[in-house]
Amino acid sequence: MKSKNREDQFRFNQIKNEITSLTRKSKKQYYKNYFNANDKNLKKIWNGIKEIINIKQKSSSSPSSLKDKDRILTDHKDIANHFNSYFSGIADNILKNRKYEGKHTYNEYLKNPLPNSHTFFECDPSEVECLITLLELDVVVVVSFIMNSLIKWIS
């Protein structure tokens, strides 16, 4: 809303903020109810998570035709073979066309490498639960519910 009257703008912002707040509360309550109702169904739990983080389903359709220079491919096998040769040859094409003729190796750029990058220790469910409770997350209701459900399911 664009108004020269400050009172109108202030009132508009108040209403907009109230609507935003109510929408967030409603979504939070909806997902809390959804996850409580589906706490035994992992498929529905993951569908709820995907809905929250807005993961789009991948399309499984393939192209019906493909233009390769001066010809059009319509056979699915020819299209697949063309994609395969194109994508499997990318690295070779880059290497052929690169201009770098230096003598440096990757070791010169990797100073002080770590001998071990990951170390895993055994732990029990209570340790995991304790660590989870220390996390500060944006979607606390959903994540804590999922983690608690998973911990109960595992133990």
Image (cartoon, helix red, strand yellow):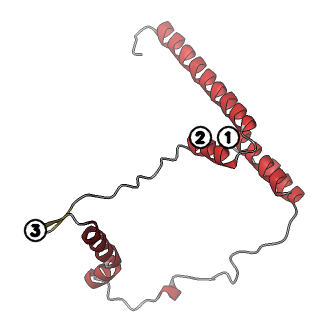
Is 81 displayed left or right of 46 in the figure?
left
Q: Amino acid at mark 3?
A: Asp
**With 98 as the anchor, is 42 left or right in this view?**
right
Are the residues tagged 2 and 1 within 8 Å (C-beta)? yes
Give the mark nearer the N terminus: 2 vs 3.
2
Which quarter shows the N terminus?
top left
Q: Residues within 10 Å of mark 1 (few under 14, many from 20)?
A: few
Side of 123 relative to 6 (left or right):
right
Relative to residue 54, is residue 33 drawn left or right? right
The residue singled out by tag 2 in the image is 52
Q: Is residue 68 above or below residue 22?
A: below
Residue 144 image position (x, y, % from top left): 76, 44
Residue type beneath disc 1: Val
Using the rendered view, name the quadrant where residue 120 is placed: bottom right
- Circle 3: element type: loop
Alpha carbon separation for disc pair 2 and 3: 46 Å
Instruction: Name the residue rendered at 57%, 41% in the picture.
Output: 51
Neighbour class for label 3 at 10 Å: few (<14), some, many (≥20)?
Answer: few
Please give the residue where the numbered disc 3 appears in the rendered image.
70
Structural distance between the alpha carbons of marks 1 and 3: 52 Å
Quadrant including the C terminus: bottom right
The x and y percentages for residue 121 are 82, 72
The residue singled out by tag 1 in the image is 139
Element at label 1: loop
What percent of the width, then of the height, locates residue 67?
Answer: 18, 63
Give the residue type that dot 2 points to: Ile
Q: Closer to the observer: label 2 or label 3?
A: 3
- Tell me if residue 61 comes above or below residue 136 in the rendering: below
Q: CA distance from mark 2 to mark 1?
A: 9 Å
